[in-house]
């Protein structure tokens, strides 16, 4: 489980909360990837919170945190090709295109083409 990975310091997992209402808006996670030195970023925001800059704030906060605490020289994030809003978040946070590949989507029981972006911390 992801919580177990966080306890083993292999992942950072946070809930995204509205500061004024303390409502849960979503979640964000960076975990060690399958390849050494590579982290995987994932985030989700409830539909009513999208388009307000919350994802950008969460991602731009998490990237340097994960680099420091998980010692990751490269972090990647991906989304389905149609998800232009997510790509905009990635670009605004300094991520650069990293290619496309098929990814298995268990909830739909099929492979889907995803576009990936990468973040390498500046030295």
Image (tube, rainbow, N blue to C red):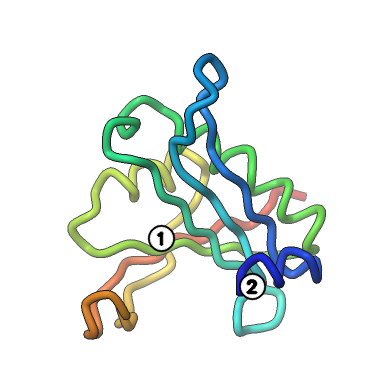
The location of residue 52, given as percent across then percent down, is: 36, 25
Which residue is painted at 44% across and 60% down in the image? 117
- Residue at 50% from the left image edge and 47% from the top image edge: 27
Residue 8 picture quarter: bottom right
Question: SS of the residue at dot 2?
Answer: strand
The location of residue 81, given as percent across then percent down, is 22, 63
Label 2 Cα neighbours within 10 Å, binned few <14 / some 14-19 / many ≥20:
some
**Residue depicted at 26% across the width and 64% down the height:** 80
Q: From what the image shows, is residue 96 above or below residue 5? A: above
User: Which residue is found at the position 64% from the left and 45% from the top?
Assistant: 62
Q: Which mark is residue 38?
A: 2
Work out which quarter of the rendered image holds the N terminus and state it. Answer: bottom right
Vertical position of residue 41 compared to residue 60: above or below:
below
Q: Which residue is mark 1?
A: 97
Instruction: Pick whichever, 6 or 83, lies toward us.
Output: 6
Indicate left or right for 22 with 43 as reference.
Answer: right
Which secondary structure lies at badge 1? strand
Q: Residue 67 bears which disc, if any? A: none
Decide which of 13, 121 is in the foreground and name it.
13
Indicate the position of residue 88 as horizontal and vertical percent values: 34, 42
Q: Residues within 10 Å of mark 1 (few under 14, many from 20)?
A: some
């Amino acid at each position: 489980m992801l919580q177990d990975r966080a306890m083993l310091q292999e992942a950072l997992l946070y809930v995204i909360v509205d500061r004024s209402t303390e409502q849960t808006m979503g979640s964000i996670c960076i975990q060690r990837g399958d390849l050494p030195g590579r982290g995987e970023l994932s985030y989700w925001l409830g539909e009513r919170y999208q388009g307000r800059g919350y994802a950008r704030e969460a991602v731009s906060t998490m990237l340097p945190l994960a680099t420091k605490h998980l010692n990751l020289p490269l972090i990647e994030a991906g989304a389905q090709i149609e998800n232009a809003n997510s790509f905009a978040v990635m670009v605004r946070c300094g991520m650069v295109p990293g290619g496309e590949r098929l990814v298995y989507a268990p909830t739909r029981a099929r492979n889907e083409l995803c576009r990936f972006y990468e973040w390498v911390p500046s030295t």
